[in-house]
Image: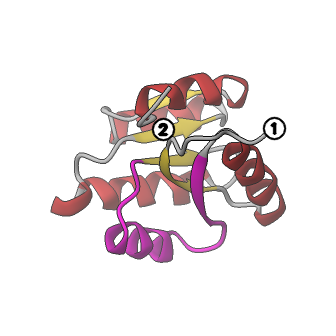
């Protein structure tokens, strides 16, 4: 089932290409326009700066330090400082580190991601 109205632009950072693509398909079916980065945090940062999305989703289950550093870089740049960031999954210590470094980010589990993103959607 494809959503009839686009909810917004989402940038997905997930350090596993196959999982990122599968998740992107699900999010697109919900009405999101999704771009993915699965290999390079600096490339993600540049891409986000060049074409700013409505929300950035960063998975912490793999390479959480890479996701955290990318989020910190987004916060340190004037054009992306206020961009909503949603951290997803990860071990408790990774989540704690990420949310302490980027305290205004939201955290959710993957099972609740759809509901968490609803607050950033242009339409509901």
Decide which of tag 1 and tag 2 comes sooner along the chain.
1
The image's mark for residue 39 is none
- For the point 37% across and 69% down, which residue is it? 51
**What separation in Å lies between label 1 and label 2 (alpha carbons)?**
25 Å
Q: Looking at the picture, does residue 111 appear above or below residue 81?
A: above
Choose top left, top right, bottom left or bottom right for residue 108. top right
On the rendered image, what quadrant is the N terminus found in?
top right
Q: Nearer the viewer, residue 37 or 32?
A: 32
Residue identified by numbered label 1: 1
Magenta stretch: give its range: 32-54
Q: Nearer the viewer, residue 8 or 89?
A: 8
Q: Position of residue 31 (x, y in %)?
A: 62, 43
Does the rendering let one see residue 77?
Answer: no
Q: Looking at the picture, does residue 55 appear above or below residue 91?
A: below
Q: Is residue 34 magenta?
A: yes
State left or right for residue 80 relative to residue 61.
Answer: left
The image's mark for residue 86 is 2
Q: Looking at the picture, does residue 122 appear above or below residue 78?
A: above
State left or right for residue 9 relative to residue 63.
Answer: left
Q: Position of residue 49 (x, y in %)?
A: 32, 69
Of tags 1 and 2, which is closer to the observer? 1
Does the rendering let one see residue 124?
Answer: yes
- For the point 45% across and 74% down, which residue is it? 42
State left or right for residue 39 relative to residue 17.
Answer: left
Q: Is residue 64 magenta?
A: no
- For the point 69% across and 60% down, which residue is it? 15
């Amino acid at each position: 089932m494809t959503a009839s109205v686009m909810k917004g632009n989402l940038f997905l950072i997930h350090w596993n290409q196959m999982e990122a693509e599968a998740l992107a398909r699900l999010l697109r079916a919900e009405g999101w326009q999704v771009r993915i980065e699965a290999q390079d945090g600096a490339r993600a940062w540049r891409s986000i700066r060049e074409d700013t999305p409505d929300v950035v989703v960063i998975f912490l289950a793999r390479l959480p330090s890479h996701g955290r550093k990318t989020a910190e870089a987004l916060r340190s740049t004037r054009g992306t400082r206020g961009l909503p960031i949603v951290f997803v999954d990860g071990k408790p210590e990774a989540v704690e580190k990420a949310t302490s470094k980027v305290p205004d980010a939201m955290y959710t589990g993957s099972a609740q991601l759809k509901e968490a993103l609803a607050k950033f959607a242009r339409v509901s």
